[in-house]
Amino acid sequence: MEEGERDLGRVLVTGAQGFVGAALTRRLRAAGQDVTGTDLRSASEPCDLTDYAQVDAVIRGGYQTIFHCGAVSGPMVLADQPLAIWRINALGTAHVLEAARVHGTARVVVCSTSEVYGTGLRWVDEVSPPDPPSVYGASKLAAEVATLAYVREHGLDAVTVRLSWIYGPGRLTATNLETVLRAVIAGQEAVFDASPEHITHYLYIDDAVSGVIAAGRAAVLQDRLYNISAGDGVTVGSLAEILRGLHPQGRIRFGGAGLPCGGPLAISNRRAAVQLGFEPAVSAGVGLDRYLRALRG
C-alpha cells in the first residue's frame, strides 16, 4: 500500500470465477491480501446475486472492501434472455449495495461498462450522456444509478468503474478477437466481423484489474464514476496491421461491410488519471502479443 491509499482490509470479490473477478482475485492474493471470492459456479462460496438472502449471508461475514464483478459479462451473453440480464446486472447490484449498507462495508467498487455510451462516433467522458443500445448496456446503467443513489441517500462509500472491451488470457466468453487470433495461429483465414474503419476499445486484462484496484484503494473519492479504458479508439484495420507484424503469415480479411463503425472515438481516462492515478500500461501491440502467446500455450 502506497502513501495516501486506503487499506483494502478484508476483501470480497463477487463473480470471482469470471474473467475480471478471477484476475483480480489472483492479483490481490499475490499481494498478500485477505480475499474471499464468491461466484454462482463456486463449489466453496456459491452465491446467486438475484437471491438477496444468499447475498446477505455472504456479506454479513464482514468485509472492508467489496469488488462487485459478478454480472452478465457482455451483450453477447444471454442475449435471448433480456429479463435474466436485467435481474443479474441491475437487481444483483442492488442486492450487493443493500447488504453492504446493512453490514457496514467501508467501500464498494461496482464494475460497469463503456457500452453505456452507445455506438455514436464521439469523444466521451463521464459527463457525456449515456445511450445504451442494448438491455445489457441499460442494465449496467441502472446499476450505476443505483450505486449513486446509495451514496447520496444512505452514505454508502461506493464507486462505479466503466471498463471498456477487456481482452487477454483467461477470458471465458467467446469473442471475435479470440476467434481471429486462433485462426491466425492455426494458419487459417482470419475474419474480423467489422470493417477496417470500425472503432474498437480493447483494454488488456492487467490494465482493467489495475483500474478496479485503484478505485478500491483511493483514500478519497472526488467522484463516483470513472472510465477505465485504453483511451483513444483503435480501428480494426490498425489491429490487423499489428497482427500481421506479429504473425506475418497470417491471412486476415474484413467481413463487416455496411455495419456501423462503432464508437466512441475516444473514451477519456483523465478523471481516473488525475484522481486515481490510473494509466493504461499495456499497448495494443504488447497485449495482442501476450494474448497470442497464451493461446499458443
Image (tube, rainbow, N blue to C red):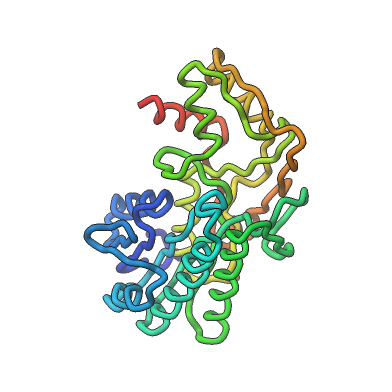
Total labels: the figure holds 0
What residue is shown at x 65% (from left), y 23% (from top)? 253
Residue at 69 percent of width and 58 percent of height: 125
Residue 8 found in image quarter: bottom left
219 sits to left or right of 54: right
Looking at this view, name the residue that lies furthest to the top.
249
Percent coordinates x, y for residue 2 in the rendering: 41, 59
Q: Position of residue 81 (x, y in %)?
A: 52, 59
Location of residue 183 with respect to 273 vertically, above or below: above
In which quarter of the view is residue 104 placed? bottom left
Residue ID at (35%, 82%):
103
**Quadrant housing residue 160:** bottom right
Near-viewer residue (14 or 215): 14
List x then y, in percent, for residue 231.
64, 47
Q: Residue furthest left?
A: 44
Look at 42% across and 62% down and name the residue there. 3
Q: Quadrant of the N terminus?
A: bottom left
288 left or right of 117? left
Quadrant of the image containing the C terminus: top left
Where is residue 185? Give x, y as percent. Answer: 47, 21
Foreground of the two, 131 or 243: 131
Q: Residue furthest bottom?
A: 153
**Eyeballing the image, is 50 above or below 233?**
below
